Image (spheres, helix red, strand yellow):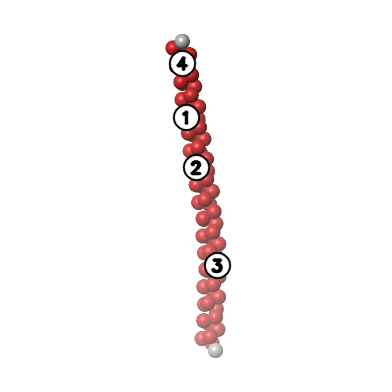
Amino acid sequence: MCCYIQVQRELESCRSETELLQKQLTSERLLLVSSREKELQRQLTSQERQTEIQILKDKLSMADSK
């Protein structure tokens, strides 16, 4: 009987730890997705700025050549 109770307690402890680890993993996945989205947005913004700069340079070059 004592061994059975001990095994039950250990099982419950393992279940609790598993649940905690699953929650932690879910949180870390969400954080990773969020970080990736932010990085992608930064890259897109940077590309847009570079494109705008190039357009302005081209316009300036055309205006200077007239």
| For marks 2 and 3 on the same chain, the one whose residue lies earlier in the sequence | 3
| For marks 4 and 2 on the same chain, the one whose residue lies earlier in the sequence | 2
Mark in front: 2 vs 3: 2
- Kindly report the distance in space between the C-alpha atoms of the residues bearing marks 1 and 3: 47 Å
Q: Which residue is mark 3?
A: 19
Mark in front: 3 vs 4: 4
Residue 30 % position (x, y) = 54, 53
Q: Secondary structure at mark 4?
A: helix
- Kindly report the distance in space between the C-alpha atoms of the residues bearing marks 1 and 4: 18 Å
- Kindly report the distance in space between the C-alpha atoms of the residues bearing marks 1 and 2: 15 Å
Identity, as a three-letter code, of the amino acid under mark 2: Leu
Determine which of the numbered discs, if any, sits on residue 50 in the image: 1
Q: Residue at x 48, y 29 (%)?
A: 51
- Are dots 4 and 2 in contact, CB under 8 Å? no
Instruction: Judge by depth and name the residue closer to the eye, 54 or 42.
Output: 54
Mark in front: 1 vs 3: 1
Instruction: Judge by depth and name the residue closer to the eye, 12 or 63.
Output: 63
Mark in front: 1 vs 4: 4
In the rendered view, tell whether residue 61 sits above or below residue 20. Answer: above
Q: Residue at x 51, y 47 (%)?
A: 35
Q: Which residue is mark 2?
A: 40
Q: Secondary structure at mark 1?
A: helix
Identity, as a three-letter code, of the amino acid under mark 4: Met
Mark in front: 4 vs 2: 4
| For marks 1 and 4 on the same chain, the one whose residue lies earlier in the sequence | 1
Q: Which residue is mark 4?
A: 62
- Are dots 2 and 3 in contact, CB under 8 Å? no
- Kindly report the distance in space between the C-alpha atoms of the residues bearing marks 2 and 3: 32 Å
- Kindly report the distance in space between the C-alpha atoms of the residues bearing marks 3 and 4: 64 Å
Identity, as a three-letter code, of the amino acid under mark 1: Gln
In the rendered view, tell whether residue 2 sits above or below residue 34. Answer: below
